[in-house]
Image (spheres, rainbow, N blue to C red):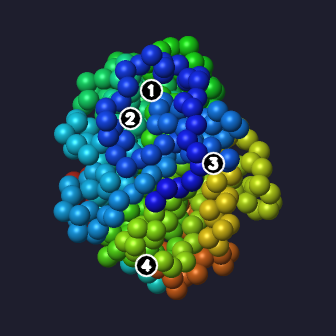
Amino acid sequence: MSTVIVEKQDTPRDETGTGTEAKSPREGAFGNATGLACRECGHEVTLGPFYACPECFGPLEVAYDFPAVTREEIEAGPRNIWRYKALLPVPDDIETSPNTEPGFTRLLKANNLGRELGIDNLWVKDDSTNPTNSFKDRVVACALSAATEFHSKVFACPSTGNLANAVAAAGARAGIRTVVFIPSNLEKPKQVNSAVYTDSLVAVNGNYDDVNRLASEIAGEEDGWAFVNVNVRPYYAEGSKTLGYEIAEQLGWRLPDQIVIPVASGSQLTKVHKAFQELITLGLVEDRPYKVYGAQATGCSPVSVAYKAGVDAIRPVKPDTIAKSLAIGNPADGIYVLDVCRSTGGAVEDVTDDEVREGILLLARNEGIFTETAGGTTVGVLKKLVETGQLDTSLETVIINTGMGLKTLDAVADHVGPAATIDPSYAAFAGSGVV
Ligand SMILES: *Cc1c(COP(=O)(O)O)cnc(C)c1O
């Protein structure tokens, strides 16, 4: 299956700083991928460290020519994302290169939360159990493979926190130099979770969009740097497809009726949709309609605002929310999120920071899963979608928990704590009012 059928053109001039003089990738380095295709004009270029179309500057995306792939072949693979390697831009021997081996996380039936919210059939895809406790390990594993094939010297990223954790850990395992950039106001646990793996955590006085601009500038100045979400972004983004594949496989090779996904840059949401479409095209699941919903925090909700206004243009915002991992004010894939949510009959919704906290506690107290603020946003939006009648509660629904609550303790630390502090005696306990 080729995403776009166009004549292959020249390799674009390298504006990324990754260096056209770099050694070429190995034969078969990108598996069944055939090229990079522009999502706007369809123009196709060779597989290289490129992310912008040389014709129209639109974003490039990996295009494939998939062979026949069977459920049995996938099921016989490792219990991590490489079971889907035939559908990713990675070499056939990917299991042999050191990486964090993310994926195949739990899909849990959430009966208690479903009852609480009035949803008949609810599942949580719990990606907080990945090696560095967020879904970012998936995308980074794919970016690392590309960076290795491009012989990059430095593995880097601008990050809202989780990505830096994943890049620093994966780079450590692969033995490649890492430099990770974050906004300086980031939660302490996310800083520590990077700094343990790398001596090159750079805190930038600015918000994520400032950090991202700086990363692009560095990529233009320095040779041999692979910025996972900048100049190798097409390969990085494909990693999110594995969430979609896993959900379908874990449901017994079936697509859910509806799915709620948090939106920062919007890459994950669009790639889960791409994964569902690929599974249909490959005949691995039945072709049936499903709705995709996007979740944002009100303090950084440029996609939700555009959705509600019924417009296509995303107006960038200055983020102000506790959901820092979603705090991208100028989301690269925002317009594609609008397209996916509208065309599937879903929606994009946003919730306040108080509702984010409530969402964290709803998931924790009903399902025993401690999510970070991004997951609180997703649960909060799920609740709001039900309350506003935008989500059909009789349909099978999946939500994605993308990260781990221990990284954003501050969000709830002042709202939960000991029910009582007592002396160690039965009388004190009996008088405490706890039971
Ligand atoms: C990065 C991130 C997201 C959103 O990812 P995008 O693909 O940029 O939309 C969601 N949840 C968590 C925890 C993240 O770290």
Mark positioned earlier in the residue sequence (2 or 1): 2
Q: What type is the residue that disc 4 sits on?
A: Glu
Tell me which numbered mark, 4 or 1, is placed earlier along the sequence. Answer: 1
Which amino acid is tagged 2? Ala
The residue that label 4 is drawn on is 286
CA gap between label 2 and label 3 equals 22 Å
Which quadrant would residue 365 be assigned to in this image? bottom left
Front position among marks 2 and 3: 3
183 or 181: which is nearer to us? Answer: 181
Q: Which of 268/276 is in front?
A: 276
The reply to whether the C-beta atoms of the residues labelled 4 and 1 are less than 8 Å apart is no
Q: For mark 3, give the secondary structure.
A: loop
Q: Label 4, label 1: how many angstroms apart (C-alpha)?
A: 38 Å
Q: Which residue is mark 2?
A: 146
Q: State yes or no: discs 2 and 1 in contact (Cβ < 8 Å).
A: yes
- The amino acid sitting under disc 1 is Ala
Question: Which numbered circle lies on residue 424?
Answer: none
Q: Distance of mark 3 from mark 1, alpha carbons?
A: 24 Å
Could you say whether the residue bearing mark 1 is in a helix, strand or loop?
strand
Indicate which disc, 2 or 3, sits on the residue closer to the N terminus.
Answer: 3
Tell which circle, 2 or 4, labels the residue nearer the N-terminal end.
2
- Measuring from the top left, give residue 329's x and y in whole percent: 67, 41
Task: Give neighbour class at mark 1: few <14, some 14-19, many 20+ (Cα, 10 Å).
Answer: many
| Residue lying at 45% horizontally and 41% vertically, measured from the top left | 235
- From the image, tell me which residue sits under label 1: 226
Secondary element under disc 4, as helix, strand or loop, is loop
Which residue position is annotated with label 3? 42
Determine if the C-beta at disc 4 is less than 8 A from ligand 1: no
Residue sitting nearer the eye, 4 or 397: 4
Q: Secondary structure at mark 2?
A: helix
Q: Is residue 319 left or right of residue 419?
A: right
| In the image: residue 430, left or right of residue 352 | left
